[in-house]
Amino acid sequence: MKVNTKKTKPAQKHSKKAGLPPGTLVHVGDKKLETVRITYIDYDEQNIKEKQVSNIEECFPLKTTPTVTWINIDGLHEVEVIEKLGTQFELHPLILEDILHTSQRPKFEDYEKYFFIVLNMLSYNDENQTVEKEQVSLVLGENFVISFQERTGDVFDTVRDRIRNSKGRIRKMGADYLCYSLIDAVVDSYFTILEKTGEKIEFMEEKLVSDPTEKTLQQIHKLKSEMVSLRKSVWPLRELINGLQRSESSLISETTDIYLRDTYDHTIQVIDTVESFRDMVSGMLDIYLSSISNRMNSVMKVLTIIATIFIPLTFVAGIYGMNFEYMPELKWRWGYGIAWLAFMVIAAIMLIYFRRKKWL
Amino acid sequence: MKVNTKKTKPAQKHSKKAGLPPGTLVHVGDKKLETVRITYIDYDEQNIKEKQVSNIEECFPLKTTPTVTWINIDGLHEVEVIEKLGTQFELHPLILEDILHTSQRPKFEDYEKYFFIVLNMLSYNDENQTVEKEQVSLVLGENFVISFQERTGDVFDTVRDRIRNSKGRIRKMGADYLCYSLIDAVVDSYFTILEKTGEKIEFMEEKLVSDPTEKTLQQIHKLKSEMVSLRKSVWPLRELINGLQRSESSLISETTDIYLRDTYDHTIQVIDTVESFRDMVSGMLDIYLSSISNRMNSVMKVLTIIATIFIPLTFVAGIYGMNFEYMPELKWRWGYGIAWLAFMVIAAIMLIYFRRKKWL
Amino acid sequence: MKVNTKKTKPAQKHSKKAGLPPGTLVHVGDKKLETVRITYIDYDEQNIKEKQVSNIEECFPLKTTPTVTWINIDGLHEVEVIEKLGTQFELHPLILEDILHTSQRPKFEDYEKYFFIVLNMLSYNDENQTVEKEQVSLVLGENFVISFQERTGDVFDTVRDRIRNSKGRIRKMGADYLCYSLIDAVVDSYFTILEKTGEKIEFMEEKLVSDPTEKTLQQIHKLKSEMVSLRKSVWPLRELINGLQRSESSLISETTDIYLRDTYDHTIQVIDTVESFRDMVSGMLDIYLSSISNRMNSVMKVLTIIATIFIPLTFVAGIYGMNFEYMPELKWRWGYGIAWLAFMVIAAIMLIYFRRKKWL
Amino acid sequence: MKVNTKKTKPAQKHSKKAGLPPGTLVHVGDKKLETVRITYIDYDEQNIKEKQVSNIEECFPLKTTPTVTWINIDGLHEVEVIEKLGTQFELHPLILEDILHTSQRPKFEDYEKYFFIVLNMLSYNDENQTVEKEQVSLVLGENFVISFQERTGDVFDTVRDRIRNSKGRIRKMGADYLCYSLIDAVVDSYFTILEKTGEKIEFMEEKLVSDPTEKTLQQIHKLKSEMVSLRKSVWPLRELINGLQRSESSLISETTDIYLRDTYDHTIQVIDTVESFRDMVSGMLDIYLSSISNRMNSVMKVLTIIATIFIPLTFVAGIYGMNFEYMPELKWRWGYGIAWLAFMVIAAIMLIYFRRKKWL
Amino acid sequence: MKVNTKKTKPAQKHSKKAGLPPGTLVHVGDKKLETVRITYIDYDEQNIKEKQVSNIEECFPLKTTPTVTWINIDGLHEVEVIEKLGTQFELHPLILEDILHTSQRPKFEDYEKYFFIVLNMLSYNDENQTVEKEQVSLVLGENFVISFQERTGDVFDTVRDRIRNSKGRIRKMGADYLCYSLIDAVVDSYFTILEKTGEKIEFMEEKLVSDPTEKTLQQIHKLKSEMVSLRKSVWPLRELINGLQRSESSLISETTDIYLRDTYDHTIQVIDTVESFRDMVSGMLDIYLSSISNRMNSVMKVLTIIATIFIPLTFVAGIYGMNFEYMPELKWRWGYGIAWLAFMVIAAIMLIYFRRKKWL
């Protein structure tokens, strides 16, 4: 699980654009799609119209209808599509810039006539074990929501199904509830990521106990920086939803406010879990370091046991290897046997000593 | 003492439900009871009626009586029971969802006509040394309190006794005082958990000094993560009670406010104690690490003492093991005796040196 | 200096009472006195009446007199005394409970008609080097102050003397000034504790440099937990005095407010000093740990010096202990002398090397 | 990359001036230019006039024109230029002092008739790998902006180009938008610095894994202090832009406010990145320290393996080097062969043991 | 540089006074002067009168004149001088107590008719390398400033010169500007202290790299506690100046407010620098600890290299020192030469191995 670094270097991305006037529309990010895919769902309690259009202009009439309209754009590299949409829906140039410049931190901005919301959609890529970040930008207007994504494939299918099947209260509610549903879907999807991460941490913890290697340290640090990256996506959410709740605007109805409170709760849960994970990873580092010390200790003990047993023995053997002419012991009939006895006694004493010290 | 992990994985639990429309009633949690158990106590200063009912509808007439009604539901897996109750008492779908989705963090929500409160009831399982968490949800209305628990068995028996025996002022007061009493009972029960945890920490501290092993480290870390888990149940309580106190609603009378202040005080005491425990556990880690270092030190000293005494001796023995033809000492009558003397002098010098260094 | 742990286990104490209705009067704490001792001082600018009474009822008439009345109760185990007083002075049951339940954190509570203040009185027990905590509860009413202590013996003698001798402005001022004087006396007494603690830290620091042992670490940790305990008594004081100052109540006159500001300043000084002490103790831990490393280093150096000098020498001696038939050196007239020369040269080279490396 | 220390010693700089009355104009900083270079751009939607003047008085008539005027001063050592400008534009002496005293932290000050803004312009000196700081002071008046720099060469060329070429909306907007553009250009340039720093950190991380030396530690610490220096330039920016946004003054139009919000967002991104970098550098320290431990471990292992294999062998050889008269083995025909066998068996046992322990 | 501990033990000082009624005037501090020295400067835009008086009463008529009066008292041990002044200028007894009790933390107190300000004046004693603290108390009234110092010699000479020479705007401004000038002079003098401290840290850093000894650690810790002491003088300044600025009182004119903002800025710069110094000192500790580890590492390497080369060699020599009767090699003509060859080959292999491992 490695957060794709190509996408998470805001410094690098941003520096590409440094110096251009604000509001200049340049897509800063990887091109992840061949063609831009534009779809819309237009519904009220009775009717629903869903369509994929090839031309953005087809969506424009929906702006003035009293029905709730959700326009979704997958792919951001065709700047003129965004531009036309911006002109038609009177979006501020800075919003369009932020949509295209895909390394925004999650934020909420109130432009009076509409709200602009940026979220990070996270998805777990099982293949190369990476968490992939994708910027989702939402514009909530009087009776429309426009969503911008870098790629096709998202966590909004459940929302689409609910609209199609009139499940839940979504068809009876306005654009604000749709917008809430999208945010909620993104937050809900974080729990899946957290579950995967949790499993990974558990796996690491077991490995740490059973077989810690030098590579383990690097993995712990990778895990740590993944936590930092997750935090960055999650923490600003709190402020974002808070901002939505506190906004005095009529764009958010009181009923939806209660639902946002629920999402806020989920966000806090996500943050709590990320923080616990951080704590766990920090704890793993402590365990790793003390396990190194422990291993050093056990290496030292082996050396000490062997050395302290044999060094004195070798000395005794050395004594009787001396060539003095007058060494009476050498002449003794049982000298050699006594020497062996001495060896054994010395070794035994040492072993008893070590056992006492609990080294054996 | 291990916090039951099955129950404390919000990520996993939550991901089961991801994508369902908000307010969908699905019980997310372990089924801990065979049948749902519904009881109510209905009382005023003079009368009291207590009953276990098999059908939730039996409780509905109590809603409109001027007496204080406490409906308690043990077991959450029969979703339709919760649903009927919700409809009758006009509870918001999100409340019902939170009741069923048993991994909420403690919180207080003001729905104008009623308050919704989530608490964690902790109980110490002596058998497998675990602290078990159980979600208790309270709904406080005009003259009723509804409590939802995952299992039978709770810390509310003292409250029930007080109602039955007219002890304290509980029978003279309204539903708000009943609600306060339930919260207070939960907070009071934390002190028991803290006491058990305190004993465990003390036991660990003694073990750390007398016989620290590699397993000790893992136990310290387990203790640490238990503290983290306790904190999660306790910290939000502060905000919860604060919220209750500050709410402008007429649901809480001024008299009860003073009692809530007392509970708030207890909560702060619990938090303080948890924080001290955290400090203690951190300190234990330091002691453990430095005790490893100390042991390494003592291993090194033994090695050094043995090696530095015998290595020079072995060298001297080696000298007189050389086969040079002209080594006058070898011919000396007392050569061998002098060699022994040399051995002893060298050893003595070393021992004195070590004693000076305070290694012996 | 060990904070008496019997008294500082709020969890244990509290759990004794868990489940009783709030306001139930049970003395939770050690019985520290045989009999309850009740004294009062009643004074105005001209007159003063001081008396020890055996019956609490004797104090009741003082309530309505315009003079300032200070009733002091030493010993809390006779619950009915507290109860009668409570009834007469219309104290809230929760106050009485807090007075008896002697492990409150310092706090200030505004009950409109009177203020309730809890303080920790610290005293240094020179005999067993412990800081002893005692809860002092103060009730400040219109023209009376009631103080509750667990034992006789307190830091209020200077206040009594000032009242008796009309020293300072105390006789000219109201009950609020008396209350301030008592709080001030408690805060002032902390400086004595800090001085003792400071001396102890200095002593430890010297010992750490001169002779650090494994026991030192445990002492440092004990000191650390003493700091934590001190902090717990001191930090809430800040909020307490702040609360008194900010209270809009007429119980505190503006003149006294200025004096409270002075006490607030002292509290900040105490907190600052406690924080510096904590920093110092943390620093001591660092020094201890690095002194272990340093000692290990020096052990290693001795081993290395001895081993690296004698191991090569022993090898050389070993060469000429070999029994090859054709070893020309063995026949040389000066072979043995040359061997000795070799020994010395090798040893000298090693010694020079070590001196270069600054190991000697 | 070393932050030029000559320029970043505020203490030293400041102490030069200590004691002079406030508002005394002395240039405190290095003289970085031979001559002061004064240029202005005067524009409205239709016209533009750009000129380098040798005499500051030439700019004065521009003050009263309705066009937007941007006066830029490169070089601060000619105090009288600043002084004349100050008199003409009625700048407060403290502003002039701050402009000349080039070690201000970024700040925003509202002088009612004009705003005073101090920024740090950072540039990466590829040659000696240093980040160079230069103070940029901006004064925003009714329809003029005056910018003061220590040197020629800045990050404002893109702004100049936009004015010249009427790119973006700059020519249609007032002085506040110009001021915003300058601030934005400075913030944008930080991303380039961050990119360079990011590359450096990545390079260090790779080196840390492949070949950590004692020098690496010093480089990590240098990197750490660079982060501290960057932080100092970046953190105050947040408050600065916030101040600008919240100011009630008519100097900033509502339209420009939205743009400032965008710059604020960028600032937060810069801060976030700097904080991640700090985390990374801290993590590098951990890795470094544990890599030292690991290497010590591997050194110890080699010693232990060699010593524990050969010490027993040497002992066995020593036994048969003894000169006892009655050592039957010495006479055996295969004694020597058996000795060799013993050597091999012992060595093999040891090797198997080490393999089991995973030391080999 | 050691902060004079005699003066910085607030606990000890304070405990001397514990129990006295508040407002009792006792000089708590070292007597640093033989006689109290009283001087005044009385000035307006045209006139100036400067005088040293022997009797405090001489200053009293100045109170009512419309000119700005600055009374300076050096030496605090003659309590009656302070007392008389207090009575004449109607100063609150607590102020007088704080003036005499010289271990106050910097603070600002608003007594409506006058402001009371306490500052720490720091001076660097080059002789014994200590930073000396001296309490300066200021009372700012309608048109007078009274300053109290413990000793003669201060940082106010530049202010005096400016008054005498009519430099800057000081003669045109009121007492508030004088007061600001005094505060500013104190803050300015901190930069000198910071410069000295900075030099010391740089010196330590170099020493740490070139020659770290056990004493270095103690010096680092002394430096650390000096930083703590500096912080204590500097941090409260922020709040102090803030308080002055925000006070609604007419004692501070709006013009002076702008100057105070400048001083506030300087204070922030001082705090920033102290914090960087703290960071640097912390970093030094890390470097010290890892340098100990590194040295241990290099000690171990030497031991390992010597031991692993010679232990096998000694074993080989031991083999041919055995006395078996049938050892064919011993009879070989070139046996001894081959043995030498074996020695060299083994040593060479080891050396190559170590070079590969980069230990040589």
Image (tube, coloured by chain):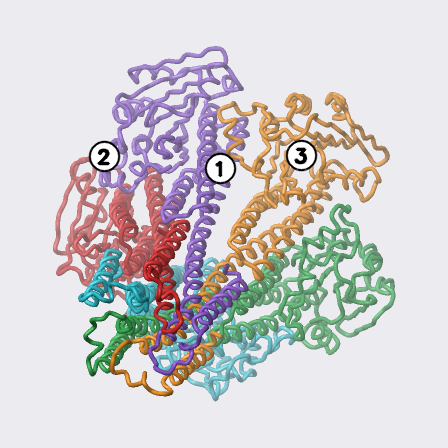
Chain colours: A purple, B orange, C green, D red, E cyan
Residue shown at the point (53%, 56%) measured from the top left: B213
Determine whether E132 is above or below B165 in the image. Answer: below
Q: Position of residue E199 (x, y in %)?
A: 31, 70
Q: Position of residue C253 (x, y in %)?
A: 66, 62
Q: Nearer the viewer, residue B90 or B40?
A: B40
**In the image: residue D163, left or right of residue A23:** left
Can residue D11 be seen in the rendering of this structure? no
Q: How many marks?
A: 3
Determine whether C16 is above or below E44 in the image. Answer: above
List the residue tagged with mark 3.
B138
Q: Residues within 10 Å of mark 2 (few under 14, many from 20)?
A: some
Q: Position of residue B200 (x, y in %)?
A: 63, 53
Q: Are marks 3 and 2 in contact (CB under 8 Å)?
A: no
List the residue tagged with mark 2.
D168
Q: Nearer the viewer, residue D39 or C242?
A: C242
Can residue D76 be seen in the rendering of this structure? yes
**Which secondary structure, mark 2?**
loop
Q: Are marks 3 and 1 in contact (CB under 8 Å)?
A: no
Residue shown at the point (76%, 29%) measured from the top left: B39
